[in-house]
Image (cartoon, grey):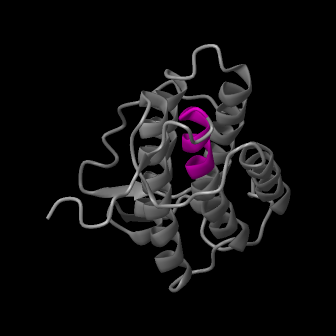
Amino acid sequence: MVKLDVITTRGGDAGETSLGDGTRVRKDALRVAAYGTVDEANAVLGLLRLHLQGDRAGDAMLARIQNDLFDLGADLCVPGTGGDRLRVSDAQCLRLEAELAEMNAVIPPLRSFVLPGGSAGAAYAHLARTVVRRAEREVVALAAEDAVNQAVIRYLNRLSDHLFVLSRRLNGNGAEDVVWTPGAGR
């Protein structure tokens, strides 16, 4: 059980923080940047949920994903891949794939690239997608230097696809997508 009774510890005032195993590292370390960006993505999902009023299924999906992202951050904050700790699993990735396929089954195929926008919910889904992509890049960079649970990378990759399809769902199943017109700004 988590118990946080002191929030201001002053432990990070010198630019360092503690990882989940107690190791002190600089706040700009790759691992800290990666799970910090995962936290940022989670915050954007919180904003997205504000635009899903009445969409119980969408809100439930995002609530599960927000919990998954906390699991993912917990996984990333402990160096290495061994030990008894909370880990992201392939089952979580498979659930994303199933949700993505279910949403996409009723959306017409794309005939152009989609610009971020349309409804407010779709715009926030696109914002979340781009933050998740950045988190994925940071985790890949971390994995090049230190051991990382590979399910974390798979989860982030699936999540960005999921958020793209969700944005189309929130745009009237693609009917209100804002499509790219090549060269339109010339």
The residue lying toward the viewer, choosing from 143 and 107, is 107
Quadrant in the rendering for residue 184:
bottom left
Q: Inspect this view and state whether residue 117 appears.
A: yes
Residue 21 seen by the camera: no
User: Does residue 109 belong to the magenta stretch?
Assistant: no
Compared across the picture, whether 141 is left or right of 101 comes to left
Horizontal placement of 99 versus 174: left or right? right
Q: Which segment did they paint magenta?
A: 163-172
Q: How far across and how far down the image is residue 51, in percent?
A: 50, 22
Indicate the quadrant containing the C terminus: top left, top right, bottom left or bottom right: bottom left
The number of callouts visible is 0
Residue 143 sits above or below residue 36 on the image: below
Measured as percent of width and height from the top left, residue 62 is found at 64, 35
What's the residue at 76%, 72% (across, down)? Answer: 82
Which quadrant holds the N terminus?
top right
Q: Is residue 170 magenta?
A: yes
Q: Is residue 23 above or below residue 68?
A: below
35 vs 103: above or below: below
> Residue drawn at (43%, 63%), measured in percent from left and top?
134
Please report the residue visible at 45 percent of the width from the left and 47 percent of the height from the top.
126
**Position of 6 compared to 79: left or right?**
left
Residue 181 location (% of width, % of height): 33, 59
Above-or-below relation of 158 to 53 = below
Extreme-left residue of the structure: 186
Residue 185 or residue 29, whichever sits in front: 185
Q: Nearer the viewer, residue 111 or 98?
A: 111
Q: Nearer the viewer, residue 61 or 105?
A: 105
Q: Position of residue 28 (x, y in %)?
A: 32, 65
Considering the whole magenta stretch, tell me its main secondary structure: helix
Which of the 4 image quarters holds residue 183?
Answer: bottom left
